[in-house]
Image (cartoon, helix red, strand yellow):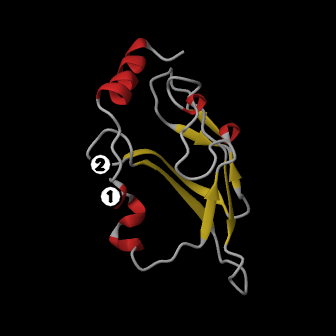
Amino acid sequence: MPPLTSWIENALGAYIVPSLRGRDAKLFIKSPAFTSVAPTLSVTSPECGPSDSSLHVAHTPLGENRFPELAWQPNPAEPDGPEIKEYLLIVEDPDAPLPNPVVHGIFYAIPATKTALAADDFKIADDGGTSHVVVGGF
């Protein structure tokens, strides 16, 4: 169970300072490095549902704080197959009640052969309970 301060922080963020839409322009994928690059894969989440779905409480600090399952497939339109060496996953929250999107995680060195991630792929680093570092099992 999260400490009481986490419950208070989340309640303040969710109810007193409501989430505002419209910060998508500040997302990493909207930065100049990506303005001329077309998307080459689609990410889906069987646990979260389609885009703009509400996140289930199990995936929040008020629940189990569990990483939702994500799945993707490389673009099949590439004639010789994609030349993917590894994946980088950046998890941002443009709806957090802050001026800029919150970065929940940056996960790197995900093998090119992996096309899905689930909660079992991650564990919190064992350092006596003070870390916010997640170790990937991929």
The residue tagged 2 is 100
Provide residue 36's location: percent of width, then percent of height: 42, 80
Kind of residue at disc 2: Asn
- Which residue appears at 59% of the width and 62% of the height? 87
Q: In the rendered view, would you say 19 is above or below 9?
A: below
Kind of residue at disc 1: Lys
Question: In terms of secondary structure, where does tag 2 sit?
Answer: loop
- Which residue appears at 38% of the width and 22% of the height? 11
The residue tagged 1 is 26
Provide residue 35's location: percent of width, then percent of height: 39, 75
Q: Residues within 10 Å of mark 1 (few under 14, many from 20)?
A: few
Residue most extreme to the left:
99
Instruction: Residue 121: name its quadrant.
Output: top right
Q: How far, Cα to Cα, is label 2 from label 1? A: 7 Å
Query: As rendered, which of 125 and 121 lies closer to the eye?
Result: 121
Which quadrant of the figure contains the N terminus?
A: top right
